[in-house]
Amino acid sequence: MLVYLIRRLSQSLLVVAVMATLVFLAVYAVGNPVDILANPDADQQERAAITARLGLDRPLYEQFGVFIWNALHGDLGRSFVYNAPAVDVILERLPATMELALVGLVFSILIGIPLGVLAGLKPESWFGRTIMSGSILGFSLPNFWIGLMLILLFAVELKLLPASGRGPTASVLGFKTAMFTWEGLKHLILPAVTLALYKAALVVRVAQAGTREVMLQDYIRFARAKGLSPLRIVGVHVLKNMMIPVVTVLGLELGSMIAFAVVTESVFAYPGMGKLLIDSINRLDRPIIVAYLMMTVVIFVVINLVVDLLYAAIDPRVRLSDAKG
Amino acid sequence: MAIPVLDVDNLVVSFGTREGELTAVNGVTFQVHAGEVLGLVGESGSGKSVTGLAVMGLIDAPGRIASGSIKLLGEELVGRSERELRAIRGKRIAMIFQDPMTTLNPVLRIDTQMIEAIRAHESVSEKAARDRARQALAQVGIPSPEERLNAYPHQFSGGMRQRVAIATALLNRPAVLVADEPTTALDVTIQAQILAEVQTLAADHGTAMVWITHDLSVVAGLADRIAVMYSGRIVETGPVEGVLDAPIHPYTNGLIGSVPSRNRRGVPLAQIPGMAPSLARVPPGCPFNPRCARATATCRADMPGPTLYEGDRMARCHHPVPAPESAAA
Ligand SMILES: Nc1ncnc2c1ncn2[C@@H]1O[C@H](COP(=O)(O)OP(=O)(O)O)[C@@H](O)[C@H]1O
Ligand code: SF4
Ligand SMILES: [Mg+2]
């Protein structure tokens, strides 16, 4: 397990390094970084200060070194709009987005897995067919449209849930989060459902296909021959095998959920990273964009790492192959 | 004579398919007594597995037991509710399957899979169940069973996995064990070891066994009686020596001709010409007639009924193979 962990960690570092290089090339080597990193309204003196700080008179590899050095120290530039380090500005929004993605993930699991398993157990029945047709709807309806409809129904008509913003936060284990207050949860429900519907549809399809395949396996027949109850067969034998593809897909999708919460956050005026990105693009706050790119890469890499570890926890065969390798 | 442990009478199993109602098992009758091994032999597709699954009550839609009776110690099983059958499955009738690589759940530890088999039928403590699982593993010749309980299936070889499956099936001391070609996927040496062990276990516990195989040489050393299946019917049955020494049905005769003998192992066998008929196109009369050297017009018109022969034997054939001259052997 340790060997596996070390190998995966070094792979992850490599990915981050490659991405850092790409971001550097995109921002520094192509075009004039001063144009990108300086406030468009900056005067000559400010521009000179940036040029000096970045060492733009020096050769490219030295500049790269400085960029990496600064990045390692958590310095990815300073936001013009907030007049604060870009990393800090993003980190401040990170909990809100993580919260949204997490609650969205929980929703998509709670909706997707039971429906998918039911549909997989009885694929020919009317409810099996209905669930699968419904999942196609979940795929094809655009995200912003679902968001608007939910706002219309639950916020405007029924007045059950707030239409926008984030609820009050409370400090839990040192994190400021809105997940543990009723008001905070109420603000999370609509955007999280919006974000979750597409993923839930995906989970339904993966879970249905997985369940159907697992049900045909010899070990299910053997489990039945042992006289196990249907609850035990589905709840233990089917679920554990079926979770392997589901975890893979959810792992891939969680990253995109965080990175592309952009639309949902905009619709619900939800103060997360995605909305910050859109605002920053509108205001030409370039250091934020650079920092956003780098941090998204790190988040993706961390999630993939976690998924791989989870995978090894579910599937003992993964553990074996690593012991050999 | 004591009542048979398993008494199957005129069993008919059919599947509703697009091509209509197909009869996979067509009037199968056999009995197995305590401690006895019945070898159920036939080519692939002859209905052996379906027969075994019917005994387990595991025929799923679109299949159904259309008629006939399956009695366990005199108790009728056909028509019982799923709930009642579940209490019998794994407890009084157990089954093991062909591919040892796939019959164990890859993501569950061996102890989980064995303990659940006990606790599905008895409310015993986890610890007591585990003790029994360990003893069962030791009985089928698995070294350091305590350690192996914590292992996952992929950590075992094919032969060891089939031993685990056998140990699991025998955990509750079932009265009947249905073994569906459990050694077919294994190499010959391991196959022989497992057969010897199962034989001892069954004899010790008085288990009645139905041993399904397409390989006559497996049954020769293991079974007490043989039932030969062709196209959903038992075409010949009798004590193993009698059937192997002097087959009555031409199909049995052909099967014996295609068994590899010791000195020509690996040489292609003298196969019975042609293929077993698909269920949708069973020929009229005796279903074996297109492949049979002895077939006549009678065979193509009339289905031969069961005829009893000396030595507790039965065969369905209009023109039985003459007994070999005792001098000609
Ligand atoms: N679920 C099913 N649906 C339709 N036909 C089936 C089904 N299961 C088995 N059969 C048919 O029943 C016949 C007997 O199959 P089987 O008992 O598996 O043969 P064997 O075990 O002797 O090789 C085959 O012709 C097979 O196609
Ligand atoms: S009945 Fe006729 S066709 Fe059938 S096995 Fe006997 S001889 Fe052959
Ligand atoms: Mg079979």
Image (cartoon, coloured by chain):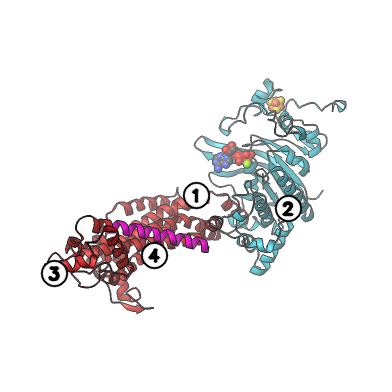
C-alpha distance separating marks 2 and 1? 37 Å
Disc 1 and disc 3 on one polypeptide chain: yes
Tell me the kind of residue under disc 2: Leu
Q: Are marks 4 and 2 in contact (CB under 8 Å)?
A: no
Q: Is residue A73 above or below residue B300?
A: below
Chain letter belonging to callout 2: B
Q: Is residue A22 magenta?
A: yes
Q: Are marks 1 and 3 in contact (CB under 8 Å)?
A: no
Helix, strand or loop at label 3? It is: helix
Which-is-in-front pick, marks 2 and 3?
Answer: 3
Q: Position of residue B165 (x, y in %)?
A: 65, 53
Q: Which residue is mark 3?
A: A45
Q: Position of residue B300 (x, y in %)?
A: 65, 23
Chain letter, colour red in render? A
Q: Which residue is mark 4?
A: A106
Q: Is residue A76 left or right of residue B259?
A: left
C-alpha distance separating marks 4 and 1? 25 Å
Q: Main secondary structure of the magenta part?
A: helix
